[in-house]
Image: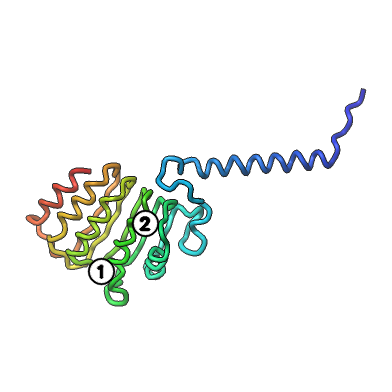
Amino acid sequence: DTEEAPDQDDLNGRTSDAAENQAIAENFETLEDFDDDEDSGSNPEAEDTHGPESSDGRRWRYGAEEAAVAVERMEDGERFPVVRCLQLDISGCAENAPSSPDRLFACLDKFPNLRELLVNSRGAGVTSDRIGKFGDRIGGRAHLTSLDLSFNQNGLRGEGLGKLGRGIGGCRKLTALELRFDQNGITSCELGDFGEGIGQC
């Protein structure tokens, strides 16, 4: 007996079914680590349609020339539960966009599932009062594991550092931390409260 050659339509159907099954499997893989997150029903493909350098909506990266666009995008959105990594450069905005630090810090609550945060605010006019407010905001990021902050060249004094330290200390899952305070007015004796707070993480 000779085996009958498969019909071309059958072959096309099998190929189509295999491709569909593969697509479904890939979608499940994409959504898999959203299961335990707050607001996990959000679509990971829909979050990043017009903005930063990103491949899947989970990572937002904005350079200094895009700082204004970044802050506006955050203010316009209600929540961004899909975003895992946020990298923002607002350096040098003290002259042309002095409100950027306050606006940025106020938006951090919109990122409930953030794992990595990098903010370069060198020369951005971040005052001691502002850095305290940032500390209040950062303390609510329960999932945060990596934090990289640059506050160089802001003329900071020791006031507000205690709040920043306590905020960072509230990030109990933090495993990587980098802080830069070059060219400020902070003295060693003003670091006590900051060190005590940060030691809680």
The single residue placed furthest to the top in the displayed view is 1
Which amino acid does the dot numbered 2 rest on? Lys
Apparent side of residue 43 relative to residue 159 in the rendered image (left or right): right
- Inspect this view and state whether residue 145 appears: no
Query: Residue 65: x, y in percent?
Result: 39, 70
**Whole-Å distance between the Cαs marked 1 and 2?**
25 Å
Residue at 28% over, 50% down? 140
State the image coordinates of residue 114 (x, y, percent, origin top left): 37, 50
- Bin the neighbour count of mark 2 within 10 Å (Cα to Cα): few under 14, some 14-19, many 20 and up: some
Question: Element under label 2?
Answer: helix
Give the image quarter of residue 191.
bottom left
Identify whether 174 is placed above or below 163.
above
Viewer-side label of 1, 2: 2
Query: Earlier along the polypeptide chain: callout 1 or callout 2?
Result: 2
Labelled disc at residue 123: 1
Q: List x then y, in percent, for residue 60.
A: 42, 58
Residue under the image location 80 percent in, 39 percent down: 11
The location of residue 33, given as percent across then percent down, is: 46, 41
160 over 92 or under it: above or below: above
Q: Visible in this render: residue 100?
A: yes
| Three-letter amino acid code at the position of disc 1 | Gly
Residue drawn at the location 36% of the way across and 48% of the way down: 115
97 up-or-down from 29: above or below: below
- Residue at the outermost bottom position: 96
- Return the residue found at the far left: 189
Residue corresponding to mark 2 = 110
Query: Where is 66 relative to 144, above or below?
Result: below
Residue 155 placement: quadrant? bottom left
Instruction: Tell me the residue at 25%/59% (across/down).
Output: 134
